Image (cartoon, rainbow, N blue to C red):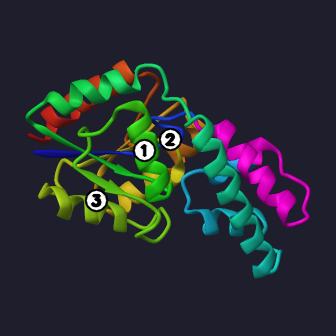
Amino acid sequence: MRLVVFDVDGTISDSQAHISHAMAIGFETAGLAPLPTSQVLTIVGLSLPEAVARLVPDQPQDVQDAIVEGYKASYRSARAASPAPLYPGAKALLERLARRDDLVLAVATGKSRRGLRALIEHHGLGGYFLSLQTADDHPSKPHPSMLHAALADTGAQEQGAVMIGDTSFDIEMGRAAGFRTIGVSWGYHPVQALAQAGAEQIVESFDALEQALTQDIGEVA
């Protein structure tokens, strides 16, 4: 069994509207002017406290904490009203991969456990992933802790394991864990950033991703 680990935001789910709105509320809660969406998207994939610290490194801890709490409250409200949509083709790909007997699927995300489970339930993704790793239980990406836990959960081996994501943090995490890495072009970090982080391959569609996984498995079998 070969382990295939997916990021969520920007890879499976198009959550930029939720993230941008929640961050704007967080900043307003702390008495700060919201940042441009383009700047907010640079930190997608990090755990929330680390993301805020990178966005406002000069602000004191109490201000950063206020942003985090405002973000959480706003995101919970938005998620309850309408969870972020999946990218077209994402669910169909996961269905096909989950049926294969040579693969086991997992998630490694900067989302909270509650947020991840809500998204999985809303979109009917239950049963596709054998391991769910979230920011609640691990250091922020790019630390490889989530991937080490996914290996332990699934009993898979590091050799041939693959990390798939849209940000440089995903690629750096995968490389740190000794995984093969595939970047996706439709997410929140530019393709150049994925290449600079060391992505072994960058794909532009879910069909291309499926083909890359098949080729990857064939190469390491």
Point out residue 158 in the picture as x, y percentages from the top left corner. 19, 57
Query: Can see residue 208?
Result: no
Q: Which residue is mark 2?
A: 166
Q: Magenta includes 112?
A: no
Question: Which residue is painted at 53% across and 50% down in the image?
Answer: 168
Going by the image, does 9 lie left or right of 104? right
Q: Of the two numbered discs 3 and 1 on the same chain, state the one appearing first in sequence.
A: 3
Q: Mainly helix, strand or loop, the magenta region?
A: helix
Q: Which of the marked residues, 1 or 2, is nearer the chain's N terminus? A: 2
At 52% from the left and 31% from the top, the residue drawn is 185
Q: Give amino acid for label 1.
A: Ala
What residue is rendered at 13% in x and 54% in y?
A: 156
Which residue was labeled with disc 1?
199
Please give left or right for residue 95 compared with residue 81 in the image.
Answer: left
- The image quadrant where one finds the C terminus is top left
Q: Residue 178, which numbered label?
A: 3
Please name which of the two marks, 1 or 2, marks the residue nearer to the observer.
2
* Label 3 CA crowd tier, 10 Å (few <14, some 14–19, many 20+): some
Q: Nearer the viewer, residue 1 or 88?
A: 88
**Residue 173, image x, y percentages:** 41, 59
Specify the quadrant of the image occupied by residue 210. top left
User: Which stretch did the figure color magenta?
Assistant: 15-39
Q: Where residue 60 sits: x, y (%)? A: 81, 80
> In what element is the residue under mark 1?
loop
Q: Amino acid at mark 3?
A: Gly
Neighbours of disc 1 within 10 Å: few (<14), some (14-19), many (20+): many
